[in-house]
Image (cartoon, rainbow, N blue to C red):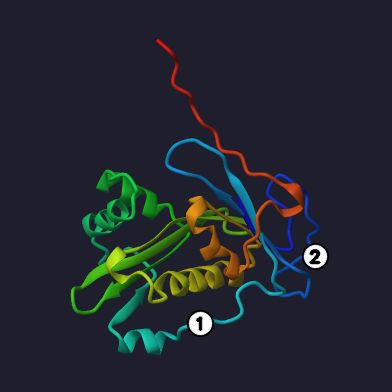
Amino acid sequence: MLLHNNISPPFLHTPSTLKTTTTTHLRNLTISSQQQPTTTTTLTGTGPKGIQGISISDKSLTTRGFNFHHSIENLNLDQLNSIFVAVGFPRRDPDKIRVALEHTDALLWVEYEKSKKPIAFARATGDGVFNAIIWDVVVDPSFQGIGLGKAVMERLMNTLLEKGITNIALYSEPRVLGFYRPLGFVADPDGIRGMVYSRKKKNK
């Protein structure tokens, strides 16, 4: 689990005076999981004000044919599903994807101008005030390695931090934990460990 900003996880009490606009170190909780139940890793971010600007400007990305969208309008769910599958997620029921997105507090996806298809995506759910969990951070394999994943995460984090949300968590496979650490995420903050409910199959 990854925590961002100098706050405690949802199950610990936090003084109401802590806000992302202070100089206090902020802490983010992120839970790391894999597709099959194994272990989870807790990461926590430490930065005075969370994300400090962005590494690639909107203008720079737009000139390269990448356009940002903040709603599900014009988002082709079948094409999004294809990206999920391409990065190793299980294929999902499009109707369930739509319901999930309708209950999402913040999302961001990148459209490639030439193909008019989504090529990167991330979303966050939560209570809109204190806590948020980031889900489904994906980049089409054909467009990986050019900074789109970082660009999406920076903007999604800023959206959450601007709302005053300080407990921010996400799930990640161990092999990509290094991607999140430069964004302010640290493992096992103060010894806090994330836990995931798992139903074990009964032996017949």
Identify the amino acid type marked 2: Thr
Q: Residue furthest left?
A: 115
Crowding at mark 1 (Cα within 10 Å: few <14, some 14-19, many 20+) = few
Which numbered circle lies on residue 17? 2
Whether residue 113 is visible: yes
Q: What residue is shown at x 48% (from left), y 54% (from top)?
A: 175
- Tell me where residue 130 appears, x and y as whole percent: 65, 57
* Residue 55, label in figure: 1
Q: Name the kind of residue labelled 1 in the image.
A: Ser
Choose top left, top right, bottom left or bottom right for residue 145.
bottom left
Image coords of residue 35 (percent x, y): 42, 42
Q: Residue 106, position in %: x, y?
A: 46, 63
Number of residues whose C-alpha sits closer than 10 Å to that of mark 2, classed few (under 14), some (14–19) or many (20 or more): few
| Distance of label 1 from label 2 (alpha carbons) | 30 Å
Q: Quadrant of the C terminus?
A: top left
Q: Is residue 130 visible?
A: no
